[in-house]
Amino acid sequence: MVKISVFLCLLVSTIVCFSVEASESKNEEVTKKDQEVKESKDPEEKPDLKIEVVSIPEKGCDKDSRKSQRLDVLSMKYTGFLENGTKFESTDDHNQEFSFQLGVGQVIQGWERGMLDMCVGEKRKLTVPPHLAYGDIGAGERIPPSSTLIFECELVKIDDGPKPTNVFTEIDADKDGFISRKEVSEFLIKHSEEKIEAESEEHQKVLDNIFLHEDKDKDGQISKEEFSGPKHDEL
């Protein structure tokens, strides 16, 4: 699925992908042992990400094998469930794998952290608490607010990823350090493969969703601090 990304995937879903929302990534090393579960608590006592290694391939997953790292492009198979067992997304439904670049804000925090140090063919189960997924807002009709999400995933392929671009700078046309609704609109229209009518109801809803998630202080513009997509020339 994915968190499947606040700014970036709302943006990307308008342009290309089928999934979820984005948030900016964090680095965390995951030491991998078969059937290992890692649990901890942050200073605010929020539940942390739970990572279960379900299986690893018999070959190609030793200490010298390539494992996923930040800036790699990963191709995944996955199915996402709510805590009550309801499926909300699956690559099987689309008959294609889901590809994303790790560490540049294209997926939810739970995936950014939970997909590190995987080898091709490895399967994991991720239990992602709300603050590492869609938070208090949720995502559309399928993911209610404050939902813990469970993902069953398999890494299919690892490719070298491109150097990430500074998306914030690209959108901030007047270079004032803030992104306006007009600037976001113009960026989406410019980068869409399909023709977008600026005043269409669908386009306005996309903008509403972006500002709902990104404009934390609700002042009508998105600051660099609020922006969850790539905003550094080198990450």
Image (tube, rainbow, N blue to C red):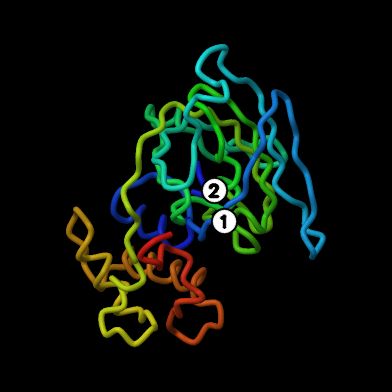
**Residue count near mark 2 (Cα–Cα under 10 Å), binned few <14, some 14–19, many ≥20:** many
Q: CA distance from mark 1 to mark 2?
A: 7 Å
Q: Whole-percent x and y of residue 227?
A: 46, 71
Mark 2 lies on residue: 112
Given residues 230 and 222, the one toward you in this image is 230
Looking at the image, do the residues carrying marks 1 and 2 touch, with CB atoms under 8 Å apart?
yes
Residue position marked by numbered label 1 in the rendering? 26
Residue drawn at 67 percent across, 36 percent down: 31
Identify the residue at horizontal 51%, vertical 75% (top origin): 226
> Left of 115 or right of it: where is 204?
left
Name the residue: 69% across, 48% down. Answer: 148
Quadrant of the rendered image containing residue 224: bottom left
**Tag 2, which secondary structure?**
helix
Q: Is residue 159 above or below residue 71?
A: above
Residue 149 in the image, given as x and y percentages of width and height: 65, 44
Residue 223 picture quarter: bottom left
Residue 138, percent from left and from top: 59, 57
Tell me where residue 177 sits by quadrant. Answer: bottom left
Query: As drawn, is 137 to the left or to the right of 175?
Result: right
Residue 170 to residue 26: above or below = below
The amino acid type of the residue labelled 2 equals Glu
- Residue toward you, 132 or 113: 113
In the image, farthest residue toward the top: 58
Would you place residue 103 above or below residue 136 in this image?
A: above
**Vertical position of residue 156 compared to residue 135: above or below:** above
Residue 49 left/right relative to 99: right
